[in-house]
Image (cartoon, rainbow, N blue to C red):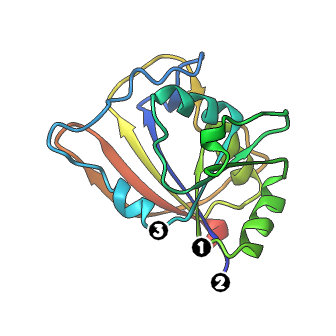
Amino acid sequence: MPTKVSVYIAVSVDGFIARKNGDIDWLPTGSEDGEDFGYADFMSSIDHIVMGRNTFEKVLTFGGWPYDRKVIMLTSRDLTLSPNLTEKVETLRLSPRELLQEMERRGAKGIYLDGGVTIQRFLREGLVDEMTITTIPILIGEGLPLFGALEKDIKLELIEARSFPNGFVQKKYRTATSQ
Protein backbone atom coordinates (compact mmCIF):
# COMPACT_ATOMS: atom_id res chain seq x y z
CA MET A 1 0.00 0.00 0.00
CA PRO A 2 1.47 3.38 -0.97
CA THR A 3 2.37 5.96 1.65
CA LYS A 4 -0.39 8.54 2.09
CA VAL A 5 0.77 12.16 2.00
CA SER A 6 -1.43 14.61 3.91
CA VAL A 7 -1.38 18.30 4.71
CA TYR A 8 -2.90 19.71 7.91
CA ILE A 9 -2.45 23.46 8.08
CA ALA A 10 -4.02 26.78 9.08
CA VAL A 11 -4.33 29.82 6.83
CA SER A 12 -5.57 33.36 7.23
CA VAL A 13 -8.71 34.27 5.29
CA ASP A 14 -6.42 35.93 2.75
CA GLY A 15 -4.50 32.68 2.23
CA PHE A 16 -1.30 33.17 4.21
CA ILE A 17 0.36 30.62 6.51
CA ALA A 18 2.75 33.13 8.08
CA ARG A 19 3.79 36.76 7.94
CA LYS A 20 6.53 37.72 5.46
CA ASN A 21 9.14 37.25 8.20
CA GLY A 22 7.78 33.77 9.01
CA ASP A 23 6.01 34.89 12.18
CA ILE A 24 2.80 33.06 13.12
CA ASP A 25 1.79 35.33 16.00
CA TRP A 26 -1.68 35.73 14.45
CA LEU A 27 -2.47 32.04 15.01
CA PRO A 28 -4.47 31.28 18.15
CA THR A 29 -2.42 29.26 20.65
CA GLY A 30 -5.27 27.03 21.78
CA SER A 31 -8.97 26.61 22.16
CA GLU A 32 -10.76 27.73 25.31
CA ASP A 33 -12.99 24.65 25.25
CA GLY A 34 -10.19 22.16 24.52
CA GLU A 35 -11.25 21.60 20.89
CA ASP A 36 -8.33 20.23 18.88
CA PHE A 37 -10.02 20.64 15.48
CA GLY A 38 -9.33 17.03 14.52
CA TYR A 39 -5.59 17.26 15.12
CA ALA A 40 -5.33 14.17 17.37
CA ASP A 41 -7.26 12.05 14.87
CA PHE A 42 -5.08 13.36 12.06
CA MET A 43 -1.87 12.64 13.97
CA SER A 44 -3.04 9.08 14.67
CA SER A 45 -3.09 8.51 10.90
CA ILE A 46 0.55 9.42 10.28
CA ASP A 47 3.91 8.00 11.31
CA HIS A 48 6.28 10.62 9.85
CA ILE A 49 6.36 14.40 9.58
CA VAL A 50 8.12 15.98 6.60
CA MET A 51 9.01 19.66 6.63
CA GLY A 52 11.45 22.08 5.11
CA ARG A 53 14.27 23.89 6.84
CA ASN A 54 12.35 27.14 7.46
CA THR A 55 9.46 25.32 9.13
CA PHE A 56 11.89 23.27 11.20
CA GLU A 57 13.63 26.43 12.40
CA LYS A 58 10.23 27.96 13.31
CA VAL A 59 9.31 24.81 15.30
CA LEU A 60 12.55 25.19 17.27
CA THR A 61 11.25 28.54 18.59
CA PHE A 62 8.17 26.91 20.18
CA GLY A 63 10.02 26.26 23.44
CA GLY A 64 9.81 22.47 23.43
CA TRP A 65 9.79 19.72 20.85
CA PRO A 66 6.10 19.24 19.97
CA TYR A 67 6.22 15.96 18.02
CA ASP A 68 6.20 12.33 19.05
CA ARG A 69 6.71 11.15 15.46
CA LYS A 70 9.91 10.98 13.44
CA VAL A 71 10.54 14.27 11.61
CA ILE A 72 12.23 14.32 8.22
CA MET A 73 13.64 17.74 7.45
CA LEU A 74 14.33 18.45 3.80
CA THR A 75 17.24 20.80 3.33
CA SER A 76 19.96 21.53 0.82
CA ARG A 77 22.20 23.14 3.44
CA ASP A 78 24.36 21.44 6.05
CA LEU A 79 22.93 21.41 9.54
CA THR A 80 24.18 20.07 12.82
CA LEU A 81 21.31 18.96 15.03
CA SER A 82 21.43 19.45 18.76
CA PRO A 83 22.06 16.15 20.61
CA ASN A 84 18.51 16.08 22.01
CA LEU A 85 17.09 15.99 18.45
CA THR A 86 19.37 13.47 16.72
CA GLU A 87 16.99 10.57 17.43
CA LYS A 88 13.88 12.62 16.57
CA VAL A 89 14.93 14.42 13.37
CA GLU A 90 16.60 13.20 10.21
CA THR A 91 17.86 15.56 7.51
CA LEU A 92 17.63 14.47 3.89
CA ARG A 93 18.51 16.04 0.55
CA LEU A 94 15.91 14.42 -1.67
CA SER A 95 13.34 15.59 -4.19
CA PRO A 96 9.71 15.02 -3.21
CA ARG A 97 9.47 11.94 -5.44
CA GLU A 98 12.74 10.51 -4.09
CA LEU A 99 11.60 11.15 -0.53
CA LEU A 100 8.28 9.39 -1.10
CA GLN A 101 10.09 6.40 -2.62
CA GLU A 102 12.40 6.29 0.41
CA MET A 103 9.46 6.50 2.83
CA GLU A 104 7.67 3.67 1.02
CA ARG A 105 10.87 1.61 1.17
CA ARG A 106 10.92 2.19 4.94
CA GLY A 107 7.29 1.10 5.25
CA ALA A 108 5.83 4.50 6.15
CA LYS A 109 2.04 4.49 6.20
CA GLY A 110 1.28 8.20 6.43
CA ILE A 111 3.21 11.45 6.08
CA TYR A 112 2.22 14.81 7.57
CA LEU A 113 3.58 17.36 5.14
CA ASP A 114 4.23 20.80 6.67
CA GLY A 115 5.67 24.09 5.47
CA GLY A 116 4.64 26.24 2.53
CA VAL A 117 7.54 25.60 0.15
CA THR A 118 7.55 21.86 0.91
CA ILE A 119 3.79 21.59 0.39
CA GLN A 120 4.06 23.53 -2.88
CA ARG A 121 6.85 21.26 -4.15
CA PHE A 122 4.87 18.09 -3.39
CA LEU A 123 1.70 19.55 -4.95
CA ARG A 124 3.53 20.48 -8.15
CA GLU A 125 4.69 16.86 -8.47
CA GLY A 126 1.20 15.49 -7.80
CA LEU A 127 2.25 13.78 -4.56
CA VAL A 128 -0.30 15.14 -2.06
CA ASP A 129 -3.26 12.86 -1.35
CA GLU A 130 -5.28 14.96 1.13
CA MET A 131 -5.28 18.46 2.53
CA THR A 132 -7.01 19.66 5.69
CA ILE A 133 -7.01 23.44 5.63
CA THR A 134 -8.35 25.40 8.58
CA THR A 135 -9.16 29.03 7.81
CA ILE A 136 -8.64 31.38 10.73
CA PRO A 137 -10.94 34.45 10.69
CA ILE A 138 -8.24 37.08 10.31
CA LEU A 139 -6.78 39.12 7.45
CA ILE A 140 -3.04 39.72 7.76
CA GLY A 141 -2.62 41.60 4.46
CA GLU A 142 0.61 40.02 3.27
CA GLY A 143 2.76 37.08 4.08
CA LEU A 144 3.83 33.64 2.96
CA PRO A 145 1.12 32.01 0.85
CA LEU A 146 0.06 28.41 1.24
CA PHE A 147 -0.11 27.95 -2.51
CA GLY A 148 2.33 29.16 -5.11
CA ALA A 149 2.51 29.14 -8.88
CA LEU A 150 1.41 25.97 -10.63
CA GLU A 151 2.16 24.68 -14.11
CA LYS A 152 -1.31 23.17 -14.31
CA ASP A 153 -4.55 23.14 -12.36
CA ILE A 154 -4.93 20.72 -9.47
CA LYS A 155 -8.51 19.58 -9.06
CA LEU A 156 -9.74 19.01 -5.53
CA GLU A 157 -12.66 17.00 -4.19
CA LEU A 158 -14.22 18.30 -0.99
CA ILE A 159 -14.47 15.42 1.50
CA GLU A 160 -15.66 17.35 4.54
CA ALA A 161 -16.35 20.91 5.69
CA ARG A 162 -16.82 21.98 9.29
CA SER A 163 -17.30 25.27 11.04
CA PHE A 164 -16.51 25.91 14.68
CA PRO A 165 -18.04 28.36 17.21
CA ASN A 166 -14.82 30.41 17.25
CA GLY A 167 -15.17 31.16 13.53
CA PHE A 168 -12.68 28.61 12.20
CA VAL A 169 -13.72 26.88 8.99
CA GLN A 170 -12.03 23.59 8.19
CA LYS A 171 -12.13 21.94 4.78
CA LYS A 172 -10.71 18.55 3.92
CA TYR A 173 -9.90 17.85 0.28
CA ARG A 174 -8.75 14.86 -1.71
CA THR A 175 -6.54 15.77 -4.65
CA ALA A 176 -7.39 14.53 -8.14
CA THR A 177 -3.97 12.86 -8.30
CA SER A 178 -4.89 10.61 -5.36
CA GLN A 179 -8.08 9.24 -6.90
Tell me the number on the disc at residue 109: 1
Answer whether labels 2 and 3 touch (C-beta < 8 Å): no
Q: Nearer the viewer, residue 138 or 45?
A: 45
**Residue flagged by tag 3: what amino acid is it?**
Ser
Disc 2 is placed on an element classified as loop
- Residue 147 seen by the camera: no
Disc 3 is placed on an element classified as loop
* Front position among marks 1 and 2: 1
Residue found at x 52% / y 29%: 16
Answer whether labels 1 and 2 touch (C-beta < 8 Å): yes
The residues tagged by marks 3 and 1 sit, at their Cα atoms, a distance apart of: 8 Å
Residue 135 lies left or right of residue 88; in this view the side is: left
| Res. 10 image quadrant | top left
Residue found at x 32% / y 31%: 29
Residue 162 placement (x, y as % from top left): 28, 54
Residue 53 lies left or right of residue 151; in this view the side is: left
Residue behind mark 3: 45
**Residue flagged by tag 2: what amino acid is it?**
Met
Residue 177 lies left or right of residue 61; in this view the side is: right
Answer whether labels 3 and 1 touch (C-beta < 8 Å): yes
**Residue flagged by tag 1: what amino acid is it?**
Lys
Q: Is residue 159 above or below residue 15?
A: below
Along the polypeptide, which appears first: circle 1 or circle 2?
A: 2
Residue behind mark 2: 1
| Mark 3 crowdedness (10 Å alpha carbons): few <14, some 14-19, many ≥20 | some
Residue found at x 79% / y 68%: 101
Residue 116 placement (x, y as % from top left): 63, 38
